Image: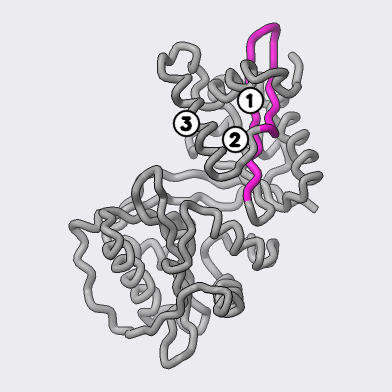
């Protein structure tokens, strides 16, 4: 078997089809699904070029794709390898090669998502030097049915702008202290990179980025983004400063986010949370969020 890059557009599209669905050749709509992926990448200025394939004869057995994003991060996508343990080492080798290329492009953080039942994929990331970060729960609510109870904390709000950029930096960075959400990432990335990656999620609108203040002092932040593909608002990030936790401020932040989403006419909100963050999960459940899926996150810090 040979590891190499696709040699032409036809082979590249075949690789994307294999990435989307291992049985893509039998899917009559696979061409449209590849078109959608390419269109998605174009709209977001993402390159699909960092791609490697494992070829046996004229057959593509496996695919690895590295999607660079703002904030010096990149997402790794690998073709499903369930029930194909013989692909473990070749795929790990492909991941190591993609790491070298990403480092040359000044990427600092690589991450891959694995469904909990896909243990073979987890072995591949581990063999390639990735570390397990967390299990993320993906949650969603129905804004049409949700009745938000009045919160006991009345806040005022600062919207993101060049004038408030430094405020958002300080507050977002401050909320990372002793956070229960993916805490092992604290201090790994520069705050400017973090904000850049948040801005790149969905359709960024500074109006929906808010710092909450109590008596003029910041207590936390909520960053929302419109997800055009699903017509929902996503809570890209939410956090309270350490001194303000367990005082009802988190509920006030989320209630404000709900009202912002409703003002946009949306019917659903989504978010993700670390499985280990029990207080946050309890609060989200009180707002009607239910689990839709879960993924294990594997990361590799470069440089």
User: Viewed as shown, does residue 56 lie left or right of 261?
Assistant: right
- First in sequence, mark 1 or 3: give its number: 3
Start-end of magenta stretch: 49-69
Categorize mark 3 by other alpha carbons within 10 Å: few (<14), some (14-19), many (20+). Answer: few
SS under mark 1: strand
Which image quarter: residue 91? top right
Which element type, helix, strand or loop, lies under badge 3? Answer: helix
Q: Nearer the viewer, residue 239 or 92?
A: 239
Drawn side of residue 242 relative to residue 260, left or right: right
Q: Position of residue 126 (x, y in %)?
A: 68, 39
Label 1 with label 2: CB-CB less than 8 Å? yes
Looking at the magenta stretch, what is its main secondary structure? strand
- CA–CA distance in space, label 1 to label 2: 8 Å
Label at residue 63: 1
Q: Could you say which quadrant of the image residue 2 lies in?
A: top right
Give the vertical position of 12 relative to 259 (above or below). above
For mark 3, what is the residue? 36
The label number, if any, that marks residue 120 in the structure image:
none
Image vertical order of residue 191 relative to residue 101, above or below: below
Q: Are marks 2 and 3 in contact (CB under 8 Å)?
A: no
Residue 63 sits inside the magenta stretch: yes
Classify mark 2: residues with Cα within 10 Å, few (<14), some (14-19) or many (20+). Answer: some
Q: Residue at x 20, y 57 (%)?
A: 144
Q: Residue at x 35, y 52 (%)?
A: 232
Residue placed under numbered mark 2 in the picture = 77
Nearer-N-terminus badge (1/2): 1
The correct choice, above or below, for 167 with respect to 51 in the image is below
Write the residue at 68% across / 32% down.
49
Marks 1 and 3, how far apart in space? Answer: 18 Å
Foreground residue among 229 and 184: 229
**For residue 94, side relative to residue 14 (left or right):** right
From the image, state whether disc 1 or disc 3 is nearer to you. 3
């Amino acid at each position: 078997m040979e590891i190499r890059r696709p040699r032409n557009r036809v082979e590249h599209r075949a690789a994307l089809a294999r990435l989307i669905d291992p049985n893509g050749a039998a899917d009559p709509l696979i061409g449209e699904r590849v078109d959608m992926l390419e269109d998605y990448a174009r709209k977001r200025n993402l390159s699909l070029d960092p791609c490697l394939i494992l070829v046996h004869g004229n057959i593509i057995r496996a695919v690895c794709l590295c999607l660079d994003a703002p904030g010096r991060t990149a997402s790794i996508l690998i073709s499903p390898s369930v029930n194909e343990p013989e692909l473990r080492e070749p795929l790990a080798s492909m991941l190591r090669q993609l790491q070298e290329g990403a480092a040359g492009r000044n990427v600092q953080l690589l991450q891959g998502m694995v469904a909990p039942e896909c243990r073979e994929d987890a072995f591949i990331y581990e063999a390639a030097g990735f570390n397990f970060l967390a299990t993320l729960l993906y949650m969603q609510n129905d804004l049409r049915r949700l009745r938000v109870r009045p919160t006991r904390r009345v806040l005022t709000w600062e919207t993101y702008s060049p004038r408030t950029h430094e405020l958002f930096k300080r507050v977002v960075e401050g909320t990372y202290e002793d956070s229960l959400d993916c805490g092992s990432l604290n201090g790994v990335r520069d705050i400017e990179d973090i904000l850049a990656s948040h801005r790149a999620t969905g359709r960024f609108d500074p109006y929906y980025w808010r710092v909450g203040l109590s008596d003029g002092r910041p207590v936390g932040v909520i960053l929302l983004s419109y997800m055009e593909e699903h017509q929902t608002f996503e809570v890209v990030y939410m956090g309270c400063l350490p001194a303000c936790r367990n005082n009802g401020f988190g509920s006030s932040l989320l209630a404000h986010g709900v009202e912002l989403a409703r003002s946009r006419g949306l019917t659903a909100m989504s978010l993700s949370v670390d499985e280990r963050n029990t207080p946050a999960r309890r609060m989200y459940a009180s707002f009607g969020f239910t689990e839709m899926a879960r993924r294990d996150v594997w990361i590799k810090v470069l440089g």
